[in-house]
Amino acid sequence: MSNETFPNMRLYPFGYCAIFVKGASPTELLARAAGTSAQPIALSRAEADIITMRGDDIGADDLPGLDTDGLREAGLLEGHGTVLRAGRHGDWSFAVEAEGVHLAADEILAAMSRDTVALSLRESDSGSSWIAYAEDGDILSSFDPLFPDDDYGNNTARLEQLTRYREAISGGQRADAFVNAVRAIQHALRCTVPAELDEHRMPAIGIADGD
């Protein structure tokens, strides 16, 4: 089994946003992200990549073997927007978005954490990254791991008390700040996910631009 954190830039070389939520189902995560009841269809990472790459030129013929009506109901043939996939490992579910920024919005993280806790991770192909943590709709930490003292959350001590992520950052190379912080946080919260799990088909929906 790989020692990689999940997600990572090997799997998503053009960047990603991800949210981990304790105790919720993958379908519930997609519904909260969409702001309405979702009608997901199962997609592998490779199939989701095809939809993302084809963009406005996407058609049912690009995804042979998948139900066209199901793809349309899931919003995946719109040709403009982003693809969200969701899965589960242990007590935590997660949603991943390649390249887009829908999951990075504060209101999405707050909604995801309602009645539970949620962790948000973001990396871009430009090298920037961001980590945020929320409990019951309140964003307690929100920071660039290169500058962990500049935390924009409402209770910045909470995540450090739970995970000691600052020690992980200070004890490693500056270039590894994000990976070291994520590893410490995921280990302490018990929301690690094997990277191999993401290869398989998981519930997915499309979110149109502006939604």
Image (cartoon, rainbow, N blue to C red):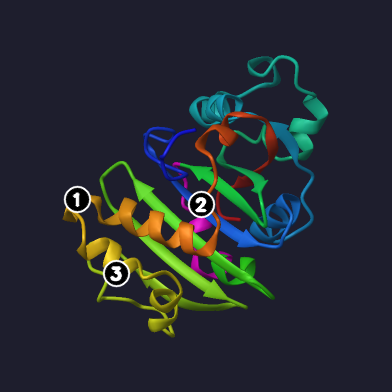
Q: Nearer the viewer, mark 1 or mark 3?
A: 3
Q: Is residue 74 visible?
A: yes
State left or right for residue 167 relative to residue 82. Answer: left
The disc label shown at residue 58, or none: none
The disc label shown at residue 175, or none: 1
| Residue denoted by label 3 | 166
- Disc on the earlier residue, 2 or 3: 2
> CA gap, disc 1 to disc 3?
14 Å
Q: Amino acid at mark 3?
A: Arg
> CA gap, disc 1 to disc 2?
21 Å
Closer-to-camera residue (7/170): 170
Residue 138 image position (x, y, % from top left): 54, 80
Q: Looking at the rendering, which quadrant does residue 69 occupy?
A: top right
State left or right for residue 13 relative to residue 208. Answer: left
Residue 14 image position (x, y, % from top left): 37, 36
- Quarter of the image that includes the C terminus: bottom right
Q: Nearer the viewer, mark 2 or mark 3?
A: 3
Q: Secondary structure at mark 2?
A: strand
Q: Is residue 54 above or below residue 144?
A: above
Q: Amino acid at mark 1?
A: Ala
Q: Is residue 73 above or below residue 112?
A: above
The disc label shown at residue 18, or none: 2
- Disc on the earlier residue, 1 or 3: 3
Q: Residues within 10 Å of mark 1 (few under 14, many from 20)?
A: few
Q: Is residue 142 above or below residue 186?
A: below
State left or right for residue 79 relative to residue 26. Answer: left
> CA gap, disc 2 to disc 3?
21 Å
Q: Residues within 10 Å of mark 3 (few under 14, many from 20)?
A: some
Q: Residue at x 67, y 57 (%)?
A: 91
- Disc on the earlier residue, 1 or 2: 2
Q: Residue at x 26, y 62 (%)?
A: 169
Q: Looking at the rendering, which quadrant does residue 200 occupy?
A: top right
